[in-house]
Structure formats: structure tokens, C-alpha cells
Image (cartoon, rainbow, N blue to C red):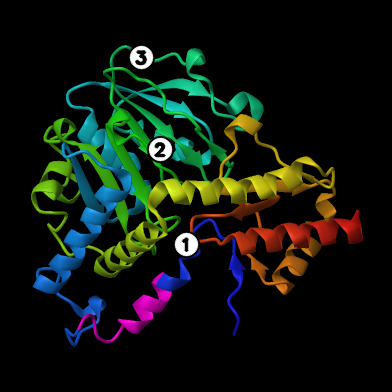
Amino acid sequence: MARVYNFSAGPAVLPEPVLQRAAEEMLDWHGSGMSVMEMSHRGKEFIAIHAQAEADLRELLSIPKNYKVLFLQGGAAAQFAVVPMNLLRGKAAADYVYTGQWSKKAISEAKKFCRMNIAASSEDRNFSYAPKQESWKPDPDAAYVHITSNETIGGVEFQWIPDTGAVPLVTDASSHILSRAIDISRFGLIYAGAQKNIGPAGLTIVIVRDDLIGQALPTTPEVFNYKVQADADSMINTPPTYAIYIAGLVFQWLKSLGGLAKMEQVNVAKAALLYDYLDQTEFYHSPVAKDDRSRMNVPFTLRNAGLDAAFLKAAEGSGLTQLKGHRSVGGMRASIYNAMPMEGVEALVGFMRDFERKNG
């Protein structure tokens, strides 16, 4: 059966070379006589896989030595609570920027642990933009500032890094991590669920500056304590071993392409192809402010919403799947992560042109 172009927001498309290599190594990893799924996380085989994955991630993102890399579980949703557990450090307040569904969920969880200050919000325009920093109203007593740097549902992406001075900047980068090079030193903490741009569901990556760990709330469970996890190489219990292995293969694939600078060039070209078409037609509409459009998640609507079902059915018949928008906003959404080839975006735009010609 031919593979489709999978535009799912997550779990999402993986690079075919990664899937092929994983298939080749399924029964016997490097002559060990075992599948990675069968390995003890304490054995020398998996310890080597884990160490290589961390080394490759550090290389790709140029992660400074004074940052810990944690391979955790629970998804980004767990980090909504884990971040305040670890980063309040004796303070009572935190700043959050409200830009859509995922920042809303992060805010809801953090409220259970601290005084919440909404430093900025884009709710006034239906979460269609990223608020400029000059409009922010931070709390001078905030322990940290939290942003969702790419809203997967709404398709809003910060194309700039906020300057929060001495206050640590925290970001949920789940749906655009590894899509471009970034200056890690501008952040106190970055977290990301893997199932969008890193690997399969089940793995969460946390990159946290050394000085921000070790002061967790006394009630913090060990499994959620960054210091405990860092001291144990993320292995105080059995980690998501197979997900870490696949993530490691993805890191190697990115390196083979030329790293994140090259990946960003490809992503810019893919996004431009789709947005340029959306901008020159009245049949479809992109709701996001041009300066804040996500390169990874592209929501769009049809002028005639009555054609939505026909659009999705015809798209699936053409091998273009998972284009239905999130249930909270409707419309369509094309997630064009790193592993989506340019050919997939070309096929989508070609299909959209044809559908418009037949139904416009």
C-alpha cells in the first residue's frame, strides 16, 4: 500500500529513512539479538542509545553545557504543572502569555500552584497573533515568564524571542522544536512533547538551565523533580526507551540533512508555498496575522463552510489525510513538520487549486 501524505498535528509524520532503519533493526539492534523495546534501560546497549541521543540533540540545538537535557514522560501537558512545581523557587507569582488553547491549558494548571498574571493576551482577535512585547504587563515579582511559542491549534508562532531580562523565559515548543536554529541561552527552560517534530508519542524533552533546578516545591513527586531526574539521567524509573531510540534516529536524520539551518530553509520554502497560495485566492482564507504565521501548523478555512466535508473526502481520496481542523476551531489545518516533504505540500496545493476550480 502506498504511503499517504499525513498532515496530522500529532502524532505526526516521521521521516521515512527513520522508519526504514527502525524496521531493519526491529528484531536485532546492532547484533545484540534484541529489539530496543526488549532492552533493559540499565543495560549497556540502551545506555549507549540514550547517551548518543542526548549528544546529538545537544549538537543540533547547540545546547550550552550549563543546561540539563531530560528525557521524561507525561507529555507537554504534564509540564504545565511540573514547571511551576520546579521553577517558582520560593516566589508566589508567574507571568503567562495567553495566545490560544495550549497556553490556556498551561495557565489553568499553573493557577493551582501560584498567583497567575496574564502578562499579555491575543484573545481580543480570536488568538490570531502573538502580542508584541511592548504591550506586555509583567508582574515584577514573577518567578518566570511562560509562552507557547507555537500554538499548534491556532497556527500562531513567535517569530522572535521575548527579552525577559533576569526573569527566566519558559516555552512550550512542542510543535516547532527542531524546525529552526534557536539561541537556547535566551531561555531558562524549553519543553516539548515528541509526537509532533521529534518522534513517537510517549517522550517529553526538557532543556533546563542548571541554576533553575534544585528548589522544587516540597510536595513535588520525585518523578516530577528536575533535580532528581537530572541526577539520575532521567532514569529514576523506566524511561520511554523505544521513543528515545526513535528520537535519536530523527536527530541523526536531521544531522545528515545538514542540521537545523538547512532544515529551516526547507521549512521556510514549504510554508511559503502554501501561504502564498492562500493569499492569492478568495476561495480559502488564512486567519493568522502574516507576521505570526506558523511554519509548522497552517490553519485555513473555505469561504463556503458547507464544502468542508466534500473537501476532506476528496483530499483523503487523493492521499492527503488528517486535514480536518481541531474541533475547537473547525476549518482545516495542514501540519507540515520537518518530516513532511516538499512533495507533500506541492500535492496539497495542487489539490486545493483543483478543488477550487471545480467548486469555486
Residues shaded magenta:
18-30
Residue drawn at point x = 28 percent, y = 14 percent: 141
| Res 106 label | 2
User: Horizontally, is 302 left or right of 240 in the view?
Assistant: right
Residue at label 3? 139
Q: Amino acid at mark 1?
A: Pro
For this view, does 308 lie left or right of residue 176? right
Horizontal side, residue 151 vs residue 21: left or right: right
Q: Is residue 323 visible?
A: no
Q: Is residue 65 visible?
A: yes
User: Mark on residue 228?
Assistant: none
Q: Which sits earlier in the primary sequence, circle 1 or circle 3?
A: 1
The residue singled out by tag 1 in the image is 11
Cα distance in 3D space between marks 1 and 3: 36 Å
Q: Is residue 20 magenta?
A: yes
Task: Decide: is 29 above or below 197.
Answer: below
Instruction: Compare residues 140 and 5 and report the one nearer the observer.
Output: 5
Q: CA distance from mark 2 to mark 1?
A: 20 Å
Left or right: 181 as drawn, with respect to 93: right
Identify which residue, 220 or 48, lies in the foreground: 48
Point out residue 295 in the picture as x, y percentages from the top left corner: 56, 45
> Which element carries disc 3, helix, strand or loop?
loop
Indicate which disc, 2 or 1, sits on the residue closer to the N terminus. Answer: 1
> Dot 3, how many residues are within 10 Å of its Cα: few (below 14), some (14-19), or many (20+)?
some
Q: Residue at x 60, y 59 (%)?
A: 342
Q: Secondary structure at mark 2?
A: helix
Q: Amino acid at mark 2?
A: Ala
Q: Is residue 288 above or below residue 204?
A: above
Q: Is residue 27 above or below residue 129?
A: below
Residue at 65% over, 36% down: 288
